[in-house]
Image (spheres, rainbow, N blue to C red):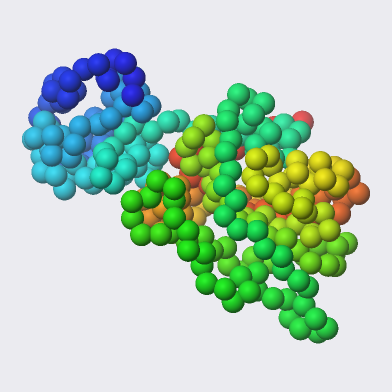
Amino acid sequence: MSDSVANRPQGALLGLVRPMQRVAGMAVWQQLRADMFGRIEDGTLSPGDVLPSETALAEGYGVNRLTVRRALADLARAGVVRTEHGVGSFVASPPLRHRIDDGQVSLLESMAMGGHTVRQLVLDARRVDPPIGDAPPADPTDGRPPLPLSRPDSHGTPAGLHVTGERYHFPDFQGAVMEYRYIRWVDELPWSVSFAAVPAALAPPSWDGANSLFAAMSDTHGVELRRDDRCFSAVPANTHDAAWLEVQVGAPLLLLSGTNSNARGQAVAYVVHRIRGDRAEYAVRVPR
């Protein structure tokens, strides 16, 4: 929370709020949303600042709590506000720009170059053997149920992580594959729920997330990695995403999928990241 807000009592914060003057043709919750958004845009409230409770806002604006709740939910979906159940609502941090043409194969190295800290938690690492004979490719989940995982600071029921139906092919490496599922934080804020698959022959003996998977592959096997195809799309957060990424179910996520290759152009990695839409901004320079 900024000093300008943190050093003022709650009553002073509420003193900034005035009863709504109804505007014809505009829903009350939209007016309230616009007013709160304006206070964030003009710097009255800064990233990390706490917002008054729903009850206090309802009394200050002269509206009911459902109106306040709808306005806050819309601001949360837009990534302007983040809400922690049982704690309160806060002004969200602006998205971080990540250049995908900066010469780095991993976000960890890219962010480190920009002075950001990246932390990773490896949730699962498993070896998937190739099918025998003419048997069809096995489902990467291998018939196993979702992983019974909990966020370290979770107060609710355990959340799971289950990347299903992923299909990848490493034509130059016909042996077993190593699959990894992990969570990534940037500057101690949740960034992505991630999945990666690499040929077992190129996988590091034991990857603990201290560095990027691709740096570990390079250190162990001398593999020179480079980004290949990248595909971006939007998906809503499911219950597991919401638990790990600290967003509401249905919040927009950026789905990134693609491959990495070695210096010979051989595919050596397949990656999928489900990224908080309010945290990430990807940029690329268009060749002239």
Q: Measured from the top left, where is residue 64 in percent x and y? A: 10, 43
The residue drawn where x is 84% and y is 58% is 201
Q: Measured from the top left, where is residue 260 in percent x and y? A: 76, 49
Residue placed furthest toward the right: 264
The residue drawn where x is 47% and y is 37% is 189
Q: Is residue 227 visible?
A: no
The residue drawn where x is 67% and y is 63% is 126
The image quarter in which residue 287 lies = top right
**Which quarter shows the N terminus?**
top left
Q: Is residue 148 visible?
A: yes
The residue drawn where x is 78% and y is 73% is 130
Residue placed furthest toward the bottom: 134
Q: Measured from the top left, where is residue 9 in percent x and y? A: 17, 20
Residue placed furthest toward the front: 206
Q: Measured from the top left, where is residue 194 in percent x and y? A: 59, 52
In this picture, residue 19 sits left or right of residue 123? left
**Which quarter shows the C terminus?**
top right
Depth check: give the residue in front, 115 or 80: 115
